[in-house]
Amino acid sequence: MRTDPPKSLRPLRAILLGFLLASTPLLTACEEEARIPAHSVIPNPTSVSLSAGDTFHLGDETRITFQPGDEEAERIGQFLADLIGNTVETTPEVTGVVENRQDGSIHLTLQDPPPSVGPEGYELVVSGAGVTIRASSPAGLFYGVQTLRQLLPPVVEYTAAYPKPLYVPAMTVMDTPRFPWRGAMLDVSRHFFQSDDVKRFIDLMALYKLNRLHLHLSDDQGWRIEIPSRPNLTLHGGSTEVGGREGGFFSVDDFSALVQYAADRFVTIVPEIDVPGHTNAALASYPELNCDGVARDLYTGTSVGFSALCTEREEVYEFLEDVVRDIAAVSPGAFFHVGGDEVERLGQEAFNAFIERMEGIVESNGKRLVGWEEVSMADIGPEAVVQLWRPLWKADDGPALDSARAAQAAELQEAALRVASQGTTFILSPADRLYLDMKYNPSTAVGLTWAGMADVRTSYDWTVGELFGILPEESIAGVEAPLWSETIDHIHDIEYLAFPRLAGAAEIGWSLESGRSWEEYRIRLGAQAPRWTALGVNFYRSPDVPWVEGF
Ligand code: IFG
């Protein structure tokens, strides 16, 4: 006999309404109506319709079911079971059933996928009879599980025991992402971060349906991935980091384990070997990479632009063949990031020729070239992906640029439009919005300010059209939030700079732009606080967000 939940557990709206009234000036009823989110899911799903039916109860008897033989549905079901349970007794049974019994279970299925949700979308139906997540791909099932996870009370994130049953209001969610590239970047070169820190970062990315982790694996200060054919890159080039402490690197096995961990959460790792600039660690490891044949000293400072491979030497291209081959062998993702940023030691012609040759090496290893926006000056192909990062990309109305920067911005825009017309696509990483290493405000203890300071609203409250409106919409692959590590060397600093802003980047990458508003988003963002507290996330409590206290 189903009973309604206790009065105190009225739908989320009542909680949010109390909240909204407490945290914003009195608004007219219709404005409030417009602003009260029916849920606190981030990224905002394409459509959420609450239904009048019975609430779903998640109790000790709840099971998770899948279609027999659908191994991915079973694996994803187990992921959900392990999230819900903390002991053998409290972990829901995951079992194959021939048909969805609607017996209070949570059913994951790839059968009869809903037609409109595309390769990463899903349909989630919640009722008193149970929960059904339907998708056309395992990724869709996984993202439906992340939404269900966020519809459950934050206490579900605890690894300690907690009271059941938990309730989810009856609803139907239809959801599909706007962009295929929804990424974050971690710079493990300036400061090295061990695998466990990267896995933690991947866990938090998965909660918000991000699907690309770009690892910045080499720079002036450190080479961070073992290249079996070039052992000195890590033995020497990986031995230190910014500030001079011991560096570190991912062995082939470490890296393969990270690739698998990410893939299990539908995150593709995109390795970056930054060339021809940002290469002092390599130049210190192999003398023949330098035009004078003399190995450089290791570098532990934070300047940029002073290094470059000797692009006139054939040994450089033999080196790059070794590097790309060895990394491609342990990197099943389709993309290889070649960097290309901030090269001050090469003329434009030499740079362009180098990038075009590098594209050949990458493609001969079965990968698509990704590069920072400078690579668009070269004759790159339609398969290439260009990462736009310099602030004021829309230079025409930014603050007055000095003439040199204005000329550079105009030149880069022209180059981007040229390659866009040939089919090249773009990842949007505007430094003044999405660089997570920018301070929130002057009191932020870590981070930089060269692109300006990015508080939570600045980072979220922009549209693709506003900043990149001159690019054809179909040329935009998505967004990515880079976190550079000149000033950080601990997972708590990563979490502090990434949260809450990474959740906003995830929403910009996933959700419809129409109707997206800071006033509405900040309420859903505030409701993440108990979840982040349960997960132990060291997030920045911006005064601009109405953080929910307690559960
Ligand atoms: N720009 C450099 C990074 C890093 C960053 C710090 C790019 C593409 C400034 N290049 O961003 O190496 O130093 O915010």
Image: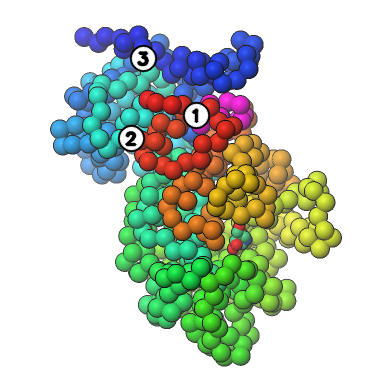
Residues rendered magenta in the picture:
516-526
Q: Amino acid at mark 1?
A: Trp
Specify whether 1 is left or right of 284.
Answer: left
Asked if residue 499 can be seen in this view, the reply is yes
The residue at the point 73 percent across, 50 percent down is: 392
The residue at the point 60 percent across, 74 percent down is: 276
Q: Amino acid at mark 2?
A: Glu
> Helix or strand or loop: what does disc 1 sit on?
loop
Quarter containing the N terminus: top left
> Helix or strand or loop: what does disc 2 sit on?
helix
Report crowding for label 2: few under 14, some 14 to 19, many 20 or more residues within 10 A (C-alpha).
many
> Helix or strand or loop: what does disc 3 sit on?
helix
Total marks shown come to 3
Q: Which residue is mark 1?
A: 547
Asked if residue 102 can be seen in this view, the reply is no
Asked whether 422 or 259 is in front, the reply is 259
Q: Which residue is mark 2?
A: 157
- Give the CA distance from mark 2 to mark 1: 18 Å
Q: Residue furthest bottom?
A: 293
